[in-house]
Image (spheres, rainbow, N blue to C red):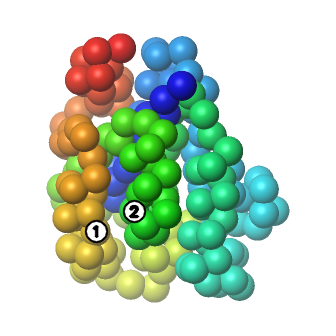
Amino acid sequence: MINIYLIGMMGAGKSTVGKILAKKSGKQCFDLDHQIENEVGMSIESIFEDEGELKFRYYETLELKKISNAVVACGGGVILSNENLNLMKRNGQIIYLRASINELEKRLIKSKNRPLLKNRNLRKSLKKILVERKKKYESIAGISILTDGLTPIEVSDAIIKELKL
């Protein structure tokens, strides 16, 4: 059975949309970051600080391998690992949830648990990360949806329509 992978920048709505989409499609929802935290017994922030980003990507791959017939809300950097990209391509549909820098900034301004944004200018950090990742997001996704101005329910409905679920 196929998975539906939601990819995109932090703050694009992957976790929120994932829960709604799973309910509407009759699939389980897995938030990849939460799965990793539960398996490893550490917060994402602690994993980044204590073990580094490479080890985090390793944990991400291990968790992706376990998931079947589900909606998967992926962390923003899941696309940085070629192994993750290949797993997702083989096992499901990849949906890129896009959002403008303004929208991402609005959504993330109060966030405290985003390791890649720690101690930095939020807007500048978001732009830098988006520039690094945008082409990968676009090239791997079969479907791309701009989430600006849409509710999570509207985004879920757009995905259902695109996938003909």
Q: Which residue is mark 2?
A: 79
Pick the residue in front: 123 or 50. 50
Tell me which residue sits at (46%, 68%) in the image. 81
Distance (Cα) linking label 1 and label 2? 8 Å
Tell me which residue sits at (43%, 67%) in the image. 82
Tell me which residue sits at (46%, 76%) in the image. 116
Residue type at mark 1: give it.
Arg
Vertically, is 115 above or below 155? Answer: below
Determine which of the numbered discs, if any, sits on residue 133 in the image. 1
- In the rendered image, the quadrant that contains the N terminus is top right
Query: Which SS class for mark 2?
Result: helix
User: Does residue 133 appear in this view?
Assistant: yes
Q: Is 95 positioned to the left or the right of 63 in the image?
A: left
State the image coordinates of residue 87 (x, y, percent, origin top left).
Answer: 49, 51
Pick the residue in front: 142 or 14. 142
Where is residue 163, by image quadrant? top left
Q: Is 24 positioned to the left or the right of 148 in the image?
A: right
Vertically, is 80 above or below 18? Answer: below
User: Does residue 112 appear in this view?
Assistant: no
Where is residue 121, by image quadrant? bottom left
Mark toward the start of the polypeptide (1 vs 2): 2
State the image coordinates of residue 93 (x, y, percent, origin top left).
Answer: 37, 36
Residue type at mark 2: give it.
Ile
**CB atoms at circles 1 and 2 under 8 Å apart?**
yes
Q: Is 76 positioned to the left or the right of 96 in the image?
A: right
Tell me which residue sits at (66%, 58%) in the image. 62
